[in-house]
Image (cartoon, rainbow, N blue to C red):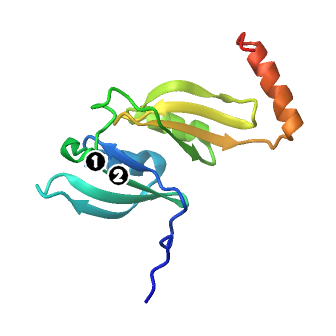
Amino acid sequence: MTAKPIPEGFHTITPHLNVRNAAAAIDFYKNVFGAKEISRMPGPDGKSIMHAELKIGDSVLMLCDEYPEFGCRSPQQLNGTPVTVHLYVPNVDDLFQRAVAAGAQTLMPVQDMFWGDRYGKLKDPFGHEWSIATHQRDLSPAEMQKAAAEAMAHTGCK
């Protein structure tokens, strides 16, 4: 039997997060984002998680505990992250409130954005940043360019 180059249920790009306390992260993602646990492989110590797969909506998220000795470092170990995971949801306001109530930190409150999304950013308790949005309106390229120029005019950006 020949394996598919992209396994069933996966997309071409799949985020893989290194976290401190993967078991707690899995619980957070289940409670806040409605993630479904697909698999969990314990580490050699029987306590840590060497690999786990979750499904959020139609996408898979992989994660593991940090293992600095193998180059797997969490955001806490790196003093932050340069990466944001973007998540589209039916109701950004409800999910954002649920995340903050569960311990996430607001980085940017939810608001209507010029590109047509209702959007906010947060940092989960494990140091990963998430942008969360509900798409509200489709804009043509000309409408988006005009809206961007108007939005940037209020910030002093040119």
Q: Give the SS element for disc 2.
A: strand
Q: Is residue 114 above or below residue 14?
A: above
Query: Nearer the N terminus, badge 1 or badge 2?
Result: 1
| Type of amino acid under label 1 | Ala
Mark 1 neighbour density, 10 Å: few (under 14) some (14–19) many (20 or more): many
Horizontal relation, residue 88 to residue 47: left or right: right
Q: Quadrant of the C terminus?
A: top right
Query: How far across and down, in percent of the image, does residue 100 sit?
Result: 45, 32
Who is closer to the viewer here, 37 or 45? 45
Q: Give the SS element for disc 1.
A: helix
Kindly identify which residue carries mark 1.
22
Horizontal relation, residue 11 to residue 71: left or right: right
Q: Which mark is residue 53?
A: none
User: How far is mark 1 from mark 2, CA to CA?
Assistant: 7 Å
Query: How far across and down, in percent of the image, does residue 90 sit?
Result: 63, 48
Please identify, in this view, whether the residue under mark 1 or under mark 2 is nearer the observer. 2
State which quadrant residue 151 falls in: top right
Query: How far across and down, in percent of the image, does residue 98 sit?
Result: 47, 38
Which residue of the protein is positioned furthest toward the left in this rendering?
Answer: 45
Query: How far across and down, in percent of the image, does residue 127 sit?
Result: 37, 33
Kindly identify which residue carries mark 2.
63
Mark 2 neighbour density, 10 Å: few (under 14) some (14–19) many (20 or more): many
| Type of amino acid under label 2 | Leu
State which quadrant residue 82 falls in: top left
Mark 1 and mark 2 residues within 8 Å of each other at the beta carbon: yes
Q: Quadrant of the N terminus?
A: bottom left
Disc tally is 2
For image coordinates 71% across by 30% down, the residue present is 113
Which residue of the protein is positioned furthest toward the bottom in this rendering?
Answer: 1
For image coordinates 62% across by 40% down, the residue present is 133
For image coordinates 47% across by 72% down, the residue present is 7
